[in-house]
Image (tube, rainbow, N blue to C red):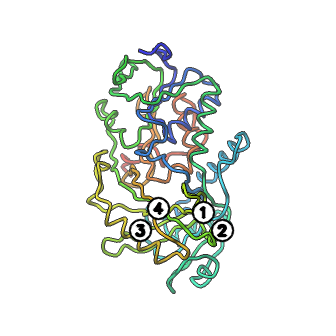
């Protein structure tokens, strides 16, 4: 084994995405030493769910508990930004718009979000279909309505990851890329690394996304999660529109093969030819693409979804030139579309079920993973993310 790698770690973390890095950064800030993050590929690689330049942050939730946790997470983001060398977020607001009906989607609903924001005194604007189209380059239908949350915005996810990396290394802790864990031996507190010797640990944090059950299943901790291949893309836009697009989420009822849920960002970057672009995506996966393991990401047939996204963007947004590039990222989903953050064994803490919306909670997730690993009381009530909820007899 490489002499630069100790044989024992106080805390070992499997997975170098958002959850693993934020947990390691939180532990580092708490003064914990001898931490190792093991990543099987590169940090935030394109096959994982932490890849990309941006994520949304907001408080506009239909679930009052998630709304409160989002407030706490935004406070933690602000603390991290105060110590960072560069901005981690950009406030530009968020528009929920489209059809208003009572059924909750994986992103909530317009009436549900409005009710929670009223209860928790979160400022927002109510917009009619006409006001939406006058204010933004969005083509709306007459029955559409909108809610605009001015304090929402985008997280520069690549900058956030770099900030966590700096925090980890500045405190003397280590990150090992290209180190794939083959086996967890929870009885002897050790990890078997492919092509290398085993290492031991006092505490283990598992944040390995769609690969979690490969590691957890053999030790009796297989999670009931599904993998959704989720399509997103960059579209090139006219220079005249670079300051026009909002951050948005469109709610529409599913019609046939079209799940109806789409989202987009304002212009945050340019492509290699210096043409401005927006990030957009589809927020559903057809049932035939959803699987119980990472085989879901083995060349899923995305062409019908690419066509649907293309039709939606070109027909509903002004100033769009064409699609520049498409991506497919894994969403690890629980049945209730909420996260799993818990400590099922005295030496193992896990995070899974990120469902594509966990990045906005990253500082809070990292802090809670760190606290659970150290057997401290969590600073926040995250009972909605604990495993016991799946076994309740109430």
Compared with residue 141, is residue 243 higher up or lower down, i.e. above or below? above
Evaluate whether residue 66 shows in this view.
no
Whole-number angstrom distance, CA of label 4 to CA of label 1: 14 Å
* Quadrant of the image containing the N terminus: top left
Circles 4, 1 touching at the beta carbon (< 8 Å): no
Q: Residue furthest right?
A: 82
Whole-number angstrom distance, CA of label 4 to CA of label 2: 19 Å
Q: Name the one closer to the observer, 391 or 287.
A: 287
Q: Which mark is residue 309?
A: 3
User: Disc 2 marks which residue?
Assistant: 243
Whole-number angstrom distance, CA of label 3 to CA of label 1: 18 Å
Residue at point 64%, 64% (across, down): 93
User: Disc 4 marks which residue?
Assistant: 324
Residue at point 30%, 33% (across, down): 220
- Whether residue 182 sits left or right of residue 107 in the image: it is left
Secondary element at image label 3: helix
Circles 4, 2 touching at the beta carbon (< 8 Å): no
């Amino acid at each position: 084994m490489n002499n630069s790698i100790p044989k024992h770690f106080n805390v070992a973390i499997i997975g170098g995405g958002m959850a693993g890095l934020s947990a390691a950064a939180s532990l580092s800030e708490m003064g914990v030493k001898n931490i190792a993050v093991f990543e099987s590929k590169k940090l935030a690689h394109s096959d994982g769910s932490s890849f990309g330049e941006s994520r949304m942050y907001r408080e506009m939730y239909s679930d009052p508990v998630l709304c409160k946790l989002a407030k706490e997470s935004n406070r933690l983001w602000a603390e991290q930004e105060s110590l960072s060398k560069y901005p981690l977020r950009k406030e530009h607001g968020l528009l929920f718009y489209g059809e208003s009906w009572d059924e909750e989607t994986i992103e909530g609903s317009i009436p549900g979000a409005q009710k929670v924001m009223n209860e928790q005194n979160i400022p927002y604007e109510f917009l009619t279909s006409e006001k939406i189209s006058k204010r933004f380059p969005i083509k709306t239908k007459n029955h559409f309505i909108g809610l605009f949350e001015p304090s929402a915005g985008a997280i520069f996810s690549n900058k956030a990851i770099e900030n966590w990396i700096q925090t980890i290394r500045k405190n003397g802790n280590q990150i090992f890329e290209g180190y794939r864990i083959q086996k967890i031996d929870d009885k002897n507190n050790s990890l078997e690394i492919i092509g290398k010797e085993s290492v031991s640990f006092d505490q283990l944090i598992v944040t390995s996304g769609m690969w979690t059950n490969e590691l957890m299943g053999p030790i009796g901790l297989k999670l009931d999660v599904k993998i959704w291949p989720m399509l997103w893309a960059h579209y090139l836009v006219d220079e005249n529109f670079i300051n026009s697009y909002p951050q948005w989420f469109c709610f529409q009822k599913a019609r046939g093969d079209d799940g109806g849920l789409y989202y987009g960002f304002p212009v945050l970057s340019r492509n290699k030819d210096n043409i401005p672009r927006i990030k957009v995506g589809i927020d559903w996966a057809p049932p035939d693409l959803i699987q119980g393991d990472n085989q879901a990401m083995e060349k899923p047939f995305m062409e019908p979804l690419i066509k649907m996204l293309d039709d939606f963007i070109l027909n509903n947004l002004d100033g769009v030139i064409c699609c520049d590039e498409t991506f497919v990222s894994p969403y690890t989903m629980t049945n209730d579309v909420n996260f799993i953050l818990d400590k099922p064994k005295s030496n193992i803490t896990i995070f899974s079920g990120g469902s594509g919306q966990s990045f906005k909670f990253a500082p809070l997730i990292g802090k809670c993973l760190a606290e659970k690993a150290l057997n401290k009381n969590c600073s926040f009530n995250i009972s909605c993310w604990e495993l016991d909820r799946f076994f309740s007899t109430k």
